[in-house]
Amino acid sequence: MRADIVVLPGDGIGPEVTAAAVEVLRAVAARYGHHFELREHAIGGAAIDASGEPLPAATLQACQRADAVLLGAVGGPKWSDPQAKVRPEQGLLALRKGLGLYANLRPVQPHAATLGASPIKPHLLAGVDLMVVRELTGGIYFGRKQRSPDAASDLCEYSVAEIERVVRRACELARGRRKHVVSVDKANVLETSRLWREVAAKVAREEFPDVTLEHQLVDSMAMHLIAKPRAFDVIVTENMFGDILTDEASMLAGSLGLLPSASLGEGKVGLYEPIHGSAPDIAGRGIANPCGTILSAALLLRHSLGLEAEAECVERAVAAVLEAGTLTADLAPAGRAATTAEVTAAVLAQLE
Ligand code: ATP
Ligand code: MG
């Protein structure tokens, strides 16, 4: 197949980890006879330096026309002055909005070889395979904000349509997995959560009779995610709860550097990026873990291009490299760390 993929390296370690994932995508294209057009565009701090804007119009247009977008990371100390009018993170928010991306998918599958790196006991982690689906465009982060000298408020709003589409997406994902969805809310206190629960139940009952839906309050979910992570398959929740629970879930995997994400909307164009940030403390040293970005490229192959066999091939290659103990400094025992280039070369060798 032919596919147009826009690559947004961004800031910090972004260019290092996207370069690794681009090599992997080229190897997949060569092995399976696909033609991937991979074009780089500017975003974030790099774009501010070049053009004064965190999301130049040319970048947004290229992304809107593409089949998929692969992003590194944006931001860094150089652009973090609170007085600054433009900030790198605005570029990412504008891109998500411009592409209509409402569902953020974060799979967490700790690998046997890296269980020891997690703060959670290894026997609780073996066999964990979960997918958190976070609503990305609504809720308290986007509601009206008000401030007076002695008070402040943030409005939390959700429409039925916004809840339906993200729950539907979660149930579709569950169909390809263990057919189990836990919807997370705070329905004992919040009106938006009561609506969320009603709509989720209706979507599951009417459209997905083969999928089991359970409801869980967010406070007890925070506990269960650590105490019995194996109990979960797909977890779907609103924006702020998802923000918090996805960071918590990332601790199951041992390192931020291992985890991929996908942001999807109505159309086929999705945005794929590692969950970590620009990691300015290690940028430019060639030691960043490229696995989260390489696994994001696997999600791109699966969700935007429909190339399931290719996606699984990349995921198996990364698992084999971790198994063999080729690990970057975030995971390796002191003095035994591999570089970004060595891990990437090992993944490419597995793909042959
Ligand atoms: P942001 O605000 O951009 O989300 P953050 O504050 O969450 O950033 P990160 O940039 O993700 O922070 O980095 C957090 C820590 O994890 C840093 O010490 C960083 O070096 C480390 N880290 C992040 N990504 C990687 C990676 N791919 N490989 C190795 N270490 C990483
Ligand atoms: Mg962060």
Image (tube, rainbow, N blue to C red):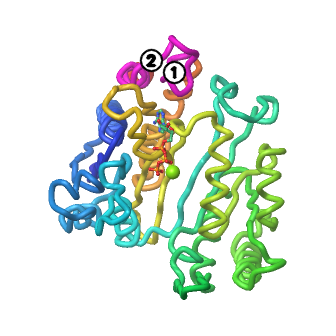
Left or right of 78 on screen, residue 127: right
Q: Amino acid at mark 1?
A: Leu
Which residue is located at x 82 percent, y 51 percent? 224
Res 286 quadrant in image: top left
Whether residue 110 is visible: yes
Residue holding disc 1: 327
Considering every residue shown, the one lying at the far left of the view is 51
* First reached walking from the N terminus: tag 1 or tag 2: 1
Q: Nearer the viewer, residue 7 or 209?
A: 7
Where does the C terminus fall, quadrant-wise? top left
Q: Is residue 205 magenta?
A: no
Left or right of 145 on screen, residue 168: right
Q: Which mark is residue 338?
A: 2
Secondary structure at numbered mark 2: loop
Residue 208, x across and y down, in percent: 71, 69
| Range covered by the magenta-colored residues | 325-347
Whether residue 158 is visible: no
Q: Is mark 2 within 8 Å of ligand 1?
A: no
Res 12 quadrant in image: top left
Secondary structure at numbered mark 1: loop
Left or right of 71 on screen, residue 148: right
Task: Assess disc 2: are there few (<14), some (14-19) or many (≥20) residues with their C-alpha within 10 Å of its C-alpha.
Answer: many
Q: Amino acid at mark 2?
A: Ala
